Amino acid sequence: MSFSAWLGLLAICCLGAMSPGPSLAMVVRHTLGGGRAKGIICAWAHSIGIGVYALVTLLGLAVLLKQAPLIFNGIAILGALYLAYMGVQALRSKGGMSEKLAAGKETDAITAARDGLAISLFNPKIMLFFLALFSQFVMVADDLLSKSLIVLTPLVVDGLWYTIIAFLLSHQAVLPKLKEKAVLIDKLSGLVLIALAVRVLVTL
């Protein structure tokens, strides 16, 4: 995998991690309810689930690419359409992030880890996201290093992003600022997701 291809993967992983959703809500809940440490535990438990999805998706798509290229291309097209759908939904959003920034209830470390792992493993949208994401990178992952990067990049990005969230939410003054920028964040994410969808279709 070339450095430019990895940068593309990194950018998409960042967008995926930053998209408002149940994962953000879970990390916010445990951070506000149990403190910074509980938020970080939840964040990295969530990232482990992301890594599992990444590995399973990568292996499955690699098999399809070798044995059934037409099916692989079909999945890539559906993935691109899903990315575009996510983009449109983000553009239409009126600040989905703000409603996720609600106060959480008291929690403990085990519960934070359990919830972080569960919210990633049992969210079907994450599998759809990876199918859309990995279809364009599997073809260039021709060695162990490239495959490792494809799995580790989303895992580490996800863990780091939600760790940053936990640190930021430890300072209550940050919450109003995040709410103010929620609409802008959604709009920018939507534009980038649509651009990525077009890129997938063009490169097939």
Image (tube, rainbow, N blue to C red):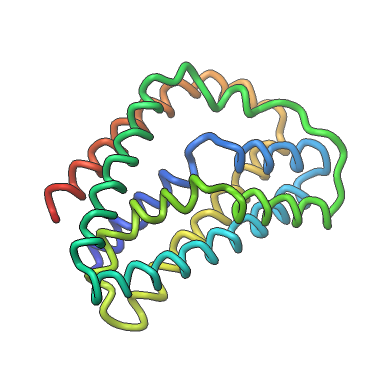
The image shows residue 65, relative to residue 81, as above or below, that is below
* Residue 144 percent across, percent down from the top left: 36, 83
Figure check: 67 above or below 19: below
Q: Where does the C terminus fall, quadrant-wise? A: bottom left
* Quarter of the image with the N terminus in it: bottom left
Is 101 situated above or below 203? Answer: above
State the residue at coordinates (34%, 51%): 132
- Closer to the camera in the image, 154 or 200: 200
The residue that appears at 64% across and 26% down in the rendered structure is 175
Q: In the displayed structure, does residue 179 sit left or right of residue 5?
A: right
Say left or right for 175 vs 93.
right
Q: Is residue 13 above or below residue 153?
A: above
Residue 31 in percent (x, y) is at 74, 41
How many numbered dots are placed on residues in this image?
0
| Corner quadrant of residue 9 | bottom left
Q: Position of residue 188 (x, y in %)?
A: 35, 30
Query: At x 42% / y 49%, what residue is drawn?
Result: 128
Does residue 1 appear anywhere in the picture? no
Indicate the position of residue 199 as horizontal and vertical percent values.
18, 47
The answer, for residue 61, to whether it is visible in the render is: yes
